Image (cartoon, helix red, strand yellow):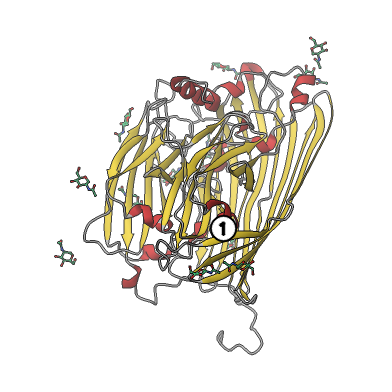
Amino acid sequence: MSVLPPPLIAILIFFLTFIAPFSFSLPEHHSHFTKHTLHHNNTSSQPQQYFEITHPLPFTKLPPSCTYHILKHNFSNTIGLPPVSTTYSPPTNCSWTHVALQFNASSKGVQYERIAAVWLGGAELLRTSTAQPNDGGVYWTVTKDVTKYSSILVKQNISLSVMLENMVNDIYTGAYNVNISFLYYDVKKMDPNDMVVDSPIKMGVNDLRSTEYEKPADLIIPISRNGSEGFWFLVLNESELHGKRVTIPKNTYKAVIEIYVSSHGYDQFWYSNPPDSYFQMNNLTTKRGHGAYREVLVNIDENLVGSVVPFPVIFTGGINPLYWEPLVSIGAFDLPSYDIDLTPYLGLLLDGQAHFLGLGVNDSIPFWLVDANLHLWVDNNCTLPCQVQANALDLGTPKFKIERKSSFLGLDGSFEVELKRESEISSWVNSTAGNLTTITKRELKFRNKIYFYLNGTEKHIKQKVKEEIEVEVLSDSGSTISKTKVKRKFPLTITTKTLPAKENGTSLIQSDLDHEWKEKKKSDGGSSSTLTNRQQCNGWMVVQDRNVLYGGATTQQTYSYSGEADCYSRVVSAVNGKLMNDTANSLCAAAPLKYGSFSAL
Ligand SMILES: *[C@@H]1O[C@H](CO)[C@@H](O)[C@H](O)[C@H]1NC(C)=O
Ligand SMILES: *[C@@H]1O[C@H](CO)[C@@H](O)[C@H](O)[C@H]1NC(C)=O
Ligand SMILES: *[C@@H]1O[C@H](CO)[C@@H](O)[C@H](O)[C@H]1NC(C)=O
Ligand SMILES: *[C@@H]1O[C@H](CO)[C@@H](O)[C@H](O)[C@H]1NC(C)=O
Ligand SMILES: *[C@@H]1O[C@H](CO)[C@@H](O)[C@H](O)[C@H]1NC(C)=O
Ligand SMILES: *[C@@H]1O[C@H](CO)[C@@H](O)[C@H](O)[C@H]1NC(C)=O
Ligand SMILES: *[C@@H]1O[C@H](CO)[C@@H](O)[C@H](O)[C@H]1NC(C)=O
Ligand SMILES: *[C@@H]1O[C@H](CO)[C@@H](O)[C@H](O)[C@H]1NC(C)=O
Ligand SMILES: *[C@@H]1O[C@H](CO)[C@@H](O)[C@H](O)[C@H]1NC(C)=O
Ligand SMILES: *[C@@H]1O[C@H](CO)[C@@H](O)[C@H](O)[C@H]1NC(C)=O
Ligand SMILES: *[C@@H]1O[C@H](CO)[C@@H](O)[C@H](O)[C@H]1NC(C)=O
Ligand SMILES: *[C@@H]1O[C@H](CO)[C@@H](O)[C@H](O)[C@H]1NC(C)=O
């Protein structure tokens, strides 16, 4: 990557995202579309609101103590430009315990969806993608709990930066008008009757995903680029490792790395990429290959310390853009970040030396945008010369197995990748809280199957990601202090059928999609939470090149969260861009009575 001069990188990003992958002819399925000649039956009317279904943040029921409108920008021709930046300082004389970031955007005309991010002091707060606009205009709001970044939010005179590369011309007329605010809340002032949450901090989808933030970190070190091209690292292939040398305070007792990631260009639909041999044997020039397994890796110096198979977020031009009106895909407006607990490696990091924290993507092809935040908790009762001590008792021998099978004749065939990782680490940290031993067990299973039928015009993709993490903390005396288990599943199936070109080079594409974010968290103290967020879509469209001329689509979404004290469920369906059914409720399904417990009566 360092061999490319900056302007070339910018051009590369642009072309890889929006043009290059489609320079070959059928039978390769196009998966990324825009709607520049599509006129809805009813679009000349009012601007339409788009949204992603999430759990509302309980503290936003309060009026904010302060509101800070920090940035307003109309992103039109921003390819290759540095991020738009402004200076941030926290509001004075404002008492707050919680903070929400509000990202409002609107657009009108024709435009591809774009990737964007917000950084504060170089730490990423939000990765988001845009909706595709239409003639009537679209607008949306993303409200994200950013309380876990409090140690940055209290800093003076730091820079808030936003990257959103866009291009406006005669055909692609849509500029993205963005308005960013911070809303500060004081939960201490909240009426307890309104504050139905598990704990002041544990709430919302993102907090369920991020199990590590019961209390915000004392210090956050961005593992990001300090760059005029955005703070994310551009990953072009599997051999690249990007990162930063960091030295952590000697009284750190807990460390979690939070990874932000999105895939683009040839890898935007990585889960549908066949192996390179398929293209070679069929003399196809497409580069969207390299098989259908990708994994983001985290290294400390030369050691692999963690990995993530990212949830396949589908942007609003993906598969069939009519699916995502006005309900966008899971994670499209607030891409999930992933936490990896690095506490077992504190023995390595606490030696007072600088260590290289590196990020890479296994099997990647151009291109990925990746960066991370290192969250650190320090022992405030232990100030120098006191030091926290840590070491690994047993780093075990991590197991890793990957199997790939492919069998094809001409354009038809099947491809399969199966992966399994298992690890068990035990380590101790001695701080003023005592000498605590942590045993972390992790199991990751990944399976992807792709089938091509009917001379490659029919494609089936079936992917499963399953991860289980169990963490047990033991006291000095060996008794269990806590034990938590988190299970996650990301199933995905996609079917597309293409009836090829007639006159004018149009083709009919029919597709079905079913994907889900499923998560269960259980602590031995009895607390538990579950989240299931599923979208099922089907539709058809007539396309010319990558333009949707007309079509129809149905999307059905079921969201269901249940926590200790707080539940939220919502069922929504959209047909041809209109909401048909939207029911929400905050009632918890009647839990079976526990024997001997009267609290539910
Ligand atoms: C527009 O909507 C009306 C009423 O829903 C329907 O009868 C008509 O066929 C639609 N026209 C097009 C071009 O889709
Ligand atoms: C167009 O939208 C308006 C407002 O939503 C609605 O009242 C009207 O029935 C719609 N017309 C058609 C043809 O769908
Ligand atoms: C944003 O810029 C575009 C042209 O680049 C312009 O047409 C549009 O009116 C602007 N929007 C706002 C809200 O300023
Ligand atoms: C700070 O806020 C309090 C209560 O809102 C107000 O009484 C006080 O005058 C403010 N102080 C300053 C310096 O603005
Ligand atoms: C952002 O959108 C929300 C919800 O529509 C609205 O309440 C808020 O005022 C908007 N903020 C700005 C700065 O426009
Ligand atoms: C922040 O910048 C302002 C204006 O440049 C300056 O007056 C102030 O002292 C700075 N504060 C800090 C903490 O650096
Ligand atoms: C691919 O190209 C080679 C050399 O041009 C040719 O011999 C072979 O038949 C082609 N294969 C297919 C499947 O078209
Ligand atoms: C463990 O940490 C505490 C607090 O920092 C310290 O007082 C104690 O000496 C440490 N124990 C050992 C065996 O070093
Ligand atoms: C902490 O406990 C572990 C496991 O019992 C032990 O091996 C280690 O020496 C202890 N560390 C300190 C500083 O006491
Ligand atoms: C399969 O597709 C290829 C490329 O589009 C085409 O050349 C070939 O004739 C097709 N074969 C059949 C049996 O339709
Ligand atoms: C082909 O495209 C031209 C120009 O867009 C249009 O006038 C013509 O009706 C189209 N033919 C068919 C069969 O769709
Ligand atoms: C709308 O959702 C509710 C709640 O799930 C369901 O009872 C109802 O049948 C749905 N209606 C339609 C038209 O899908």
Q: Which residue is mark 1?
A: 343
- Picture quarter with the C terminus: bottom right
**Badge 1 amino acid:** Thr
Quarter of the displayed picture in which ligand 2 can be seen: top left
Residue plotted at (45% across, 36% down): 225
In-image side of 480 versus 259 (left or right) = right
Vertical arrangement, residue 49 with respect to residue 378, above or below: above
- Picture quarter with the N terminus: top right
Residue 308 can be seen, yes or no: no
Q: Quadrant of residue 494?
A: top right
Residue 320 pos. (x, y %): 59, 36
**Residues packed near mark 1 inside 10 Å, few (<14), some (14 to 19) or many (20 plus):** many
Residue plotted at (62% across, 37% down): 361
Callout 1: CB less than 8 Å from ligand 9: no
Vertical arrangement, residue 307 with respect to residue 598, above or below: above
Residue 476 vs residue 220, the one in the foreground: 476
